[in-house]
Image (tube, grey):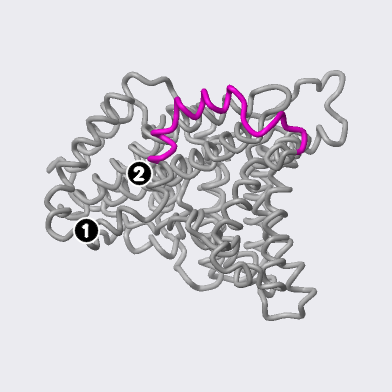
Amino acid sequence: MVFSSTVFLFLFLPLTLCIYYNPWIKGRRCRNVFLLLVSLLFYAWGEPVFVFLMLLSIGVGYLVGRHLQGTRRKWWLGAGVTFHVGLLFVFKYLTFVLGQLGLLVGRLEGFAIALPIGISFFTFQLLSYLFDVYYGKAVAQRNILNLGLYVALFPQLIAGPIVRYDAIAAEIMGRRENLTDFSEGMMRFIYGLAKKVLIANYMGQLADTVFAMEGSLSVGTAWLGAIAYTLQIYFDFSGYSDMAIGLGRMFGFHFAENFNYPYIARSATEFWRRWHISLGSWFRDYVYIPLGGNRCPKWHWVLNLFAVWALTGIWHGANYTFLVWGLFYFVLLLLEKFTHLPEKLGIFAHVYALVAVMVGWVMFRSANLGAGLHYIGMLFGIGSIGLADEYFWLYFSQTASVLLTGIIFSLPVVPWLKKHGGRFVENIEPVATLGLFLLTLVVTVSASYNPFIYFNF
């Protein structure tokens, strides 16, 4: 089940809200148990078997967490991390590793392990719980149902944001739902839904068409496909994060922001301060800093940075394209650190950052390294068939309005309007949001199923 599906919008969410706020369900414990049950139902809707895997992970996390405040703390932490990372490895990477070792032959030909939806996200949340308890940032949860709610809470279960346990522990039992949070959460959900349905899906159709074209492309068509995917992945993932944050507020939870207009960045370094903030901060706090951060010899710092970006790449999937994509940013960050390139470029720094990000997205989107390198070459005229062809003009004319809309709203236009629009914007926002919601509903009902990109990670 996805947030933009008709089942979720017309059945699951309305029923959940009606029952959750029913006067018969009183007390924090009752509401938490109900939220846990509907969250498990939400996950089981698409993954009926793997819900038991998630329950196993929660059970092990609870057991380990209870022992992290006693003796043999390091042993228990090591055991817990080994279990959760091992589980992630088996389901996400083992098939790829065996394939690379040449073992998938004969009887094992076609062998593949199904990837549970959201396993990277709920695994990282359980790891953050264990680390927070171990380092004394949080107290081990005594109630396994509360820990289960932290992990399985449906707004953030499938594709984040990656919620830290220490950031949400107090709200599990101490949150206070109110009308302001509910109304603002509902508007945030609608904004995210519109991003997904009205922009990301259409850009996805264009990107899929261009990337699927066989042979060589014109430079214009190649850039059109790259721009389309750049907009698709932003509005798809930030739209999901908006919906998750909005849903959380409807139930009294306050999740941290996950995006801050990353495409206005003037460097790769700044881009990653604005893109998938919860993942970047997770690797910073639980990998980079424990390895020594930047308070170590320069060669050691480079190794720390390499480890973080290699892990960031393969976290997204078992493919060399993701590893190369991660190491691409490792190289860019080193370049920016040692040469101060963005400062030297001045007003052209934004162009440099955008081109670098789009080149990275091409590799990220490609099926394999060869296809990615070939596509990147065509962006710069290597192996292309001219500057523009009939496909470029056809696709551009069909999608120009959505492209322009996506480009405009990838900039901080809405915050600017709220800041400078005064009472007029305040008064018109609810009406505009309602109109936006009705439009997205019409498009949703008439559109085909289109899952979120980060469901695959």
Answer above or below: position of 5 versus 149: above
Label 1 and label 2: CA atoms lie apart by 20 Å
Q: Quadrant of residue 98?
A: top right
Name the amino acid, label 1.
Arg
Residue bounds of the magenta highlight = 382-405
Q: Position of residue 456 (x, y in %)?
A: 57, 36
| Residue 209, image x, y percentages | 57, 24
Q: Secondary structure at mark 2?
A: helix
Whether residue 252 sits left or right of residue 137 in the image: it is left
Q: What residue sits 77% from the left and 67% below the top? A: 303
Viewer-closest of 130 and 407: 407
Return the x and y of residue 374 as percentages of the image width and height.
75, 35
Q: Tell me: 418 left or right of 74.
A: left
Badge 1: residue crowd in 10 Å (few <14, some 14–19, many ≥20) = few
Q: Which mark is residue 430?
A: none
Q: Is residue 394 left or right of residue 311?
A: left
- The residue beneath circle 2 is 243
Q: Residue beneath label 1, please?
A: 176
Q: Position of residue 246 (x, y in %)?
A: 30, 48
Task: Confirm or deny contact between disc 1 and disc 2 (CB under 8 A).
Answer: no
